[in-house]
Amino acid sequence: MKFKLFLLILIITTFLSQAQVHNQNDTIIDGTVYTLIEEPAAFPGGVVGFYDYLGKNVKYPRLAARSGTEGRVFVQFIVEKDGTISNVDVVKGIGSGCDEEALRVMKMMPKWKPGKTNGEPARQKLVQVIEFKLTKAKKTKKRNH
């Protein structure tokens, strides 16, 4: 049975840690990781491009849909000097397959425009929030079963 699902993607870029502070899971590739930076890293196509990318690639996990799981998954990652994404990790998840789906999609992102400090490319740590939300129709069907 196909369920009509609505996936609301909420993009919030937040900065979690201070410059030069590293999570033990971080791999230091090329120097300092910044959180606040003069020219922040940007997804190709900007915010609209990022919405489009997530909308086309995020699949609502079957377990989450069946169990009615909704919420926000906070994914931390580093945009490297060459624009590649590294150190992708869920900072706060909701389970039911949503965390894994958020990681999958974030890990396959295309290269970003790297951030810059003093006119030079710099590594930047970011957090994106991906919100998983079911349509009212799906919630109503779930309650009727």
Image: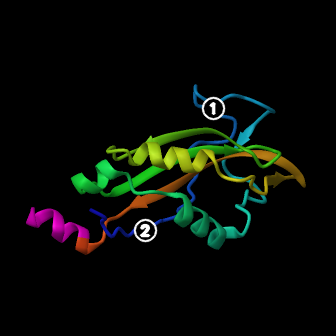
Query: Residue 35: x percent and y percent?
Result: 66, 48
- The reply to whether the magenta stretch includes residue 142 is yes
Residue 53 falls in which quadrant of the image? Answer: bottom right
Q: Are marks 2 and 1 in contact (CB under 8 Å)?
A: no
The kind of residue tagged 2 is Leu
The kind of residue tagged 1 is His
Secondary structure at badge 1 equals: loop
User: Which residue does the image show at 90% across and 55% down from the upper left?
Assistant: 119
- The reply to whether the magenta stretch includes residue 31 is no
Mark toward the viewer: 2 or 1: 2
How many marks on residues?
Answer: 2
Query: Residue 132: x percent and y percent?
Result: 38, 60
Vertical position of residue 139 compared to residue 24: above or below:
below
User: Which residue does the image show at 47% across and 65% down from the upper left?
Assistant: 9
Observer-nearest residue: 144 or 26? 144
Q: Residues within 10 Å of mark 1 (few under 14, many from 20)?
A: some
User: Which residue does the image show at 33% across and 51% down from the upper left?
Assistant: 62
Report, in whole angstroms, how far the alpha carbon at label 2 lies from the one at label 1. 31 Å
Residue 99 falls in which quadrant of the image? Answer: top left
Mark 2 or mark 1: whose residue is earlier in sequence: 2
Which residue has dot 2 on it? 8
Which residue has dot 1 on it? 22
Vertical position of residue 52 compared to residue 41: above or below:
below
Q: The magenta stretch spans which residues?
A: 138-145
Secondary structure at badge 2 equals: loop
Residue projecting furthest to the left: 144
Residue projecting furthest to the front: 1
Observer-nearest residue: 110 or 41? 110
